[in-house]
Image (cartoon, grey):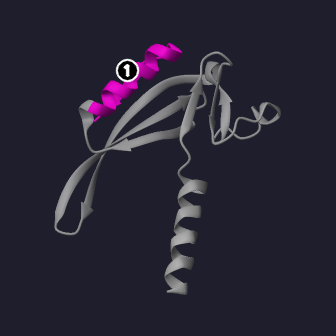
Amino acid sequence: MFIGVVFTVVGLAATFLFFETLTFDKAQGVYFRGQYEPEKTFVNRQKQGRLADIYALQILSEHLHSGVSPFISYELNLVFENGERLNVMDHGDLSALEDSAMRLAELIHVPIWKAY
């Protein structure tokens, strides 16, 4: 029983540490994962940064294999002027991902690049 509790706690901690939601704050002109720290806005783009630095949104498809059934997954990324990318989400439903991308593109006034 104790080992099960340990694995559960470690799994939950990993989920919160590695899969934090990306928040877009138009009022402050920033995006961030987890807690916004104003003094660190320009230190690590993967953690937080300025909305004005986002050049475009990118939608990619990837063919994955899980067991015997291959499937297509779609990925939404932020693209910066230097080509650096930051993953926003992965989704199995292209229509739902495109809807999210459209809302985000309208919010931050950038184009959507479709590569699928």
Residue depicted at 28% across the width and 36% down the height: 116
27 or 4, which lies in front?
4
Residue depicted at 63% across the width and 18% down the height: 52
Quarter assignment of residue 98: top left
Quarter assignment of residue 95: top left
Above or below: residue 8 compared with residue 39: below
Pinpoint residue 79: horizontal percent, then vertical percent. Answer: 52, 30
Q: Residue furthest left?
A: 68
Pinpoint residue 106: horizontal percent, then vertical percent. Answer: 44, 14
102 within the magenta span: yes
Provide the secondary structure element on which disc 1 rests.
helix
27 vs 1, left or right, is right
Instruction: Report if residue 116 is visible in the image.
Output: yes
Pinpoint residue 23: horizontal percent, then vertical percent. Answer: 57, 32
Check disc 1 and report the residue beneath it: 102
22 or 55, which lies in front?
22
Q: What span is in magenta?
A: 96-116
15 or 53, which lies in front?
15
Q: How many marks?
A: 1
Q: Residues within 10 Å of mark 1 (few under 14, many from 20)?
A: some
Above or below: residue 65 compared with residue 85: below
Q: Residue furthest front?
A: 1
Name the chief secondary structure element in magenta. Answer: helix
Pinpoint residue 26: horizontal percent, then vertical percent. Answer: 60, 17
- The amino acid pointed to by label 1 is Met
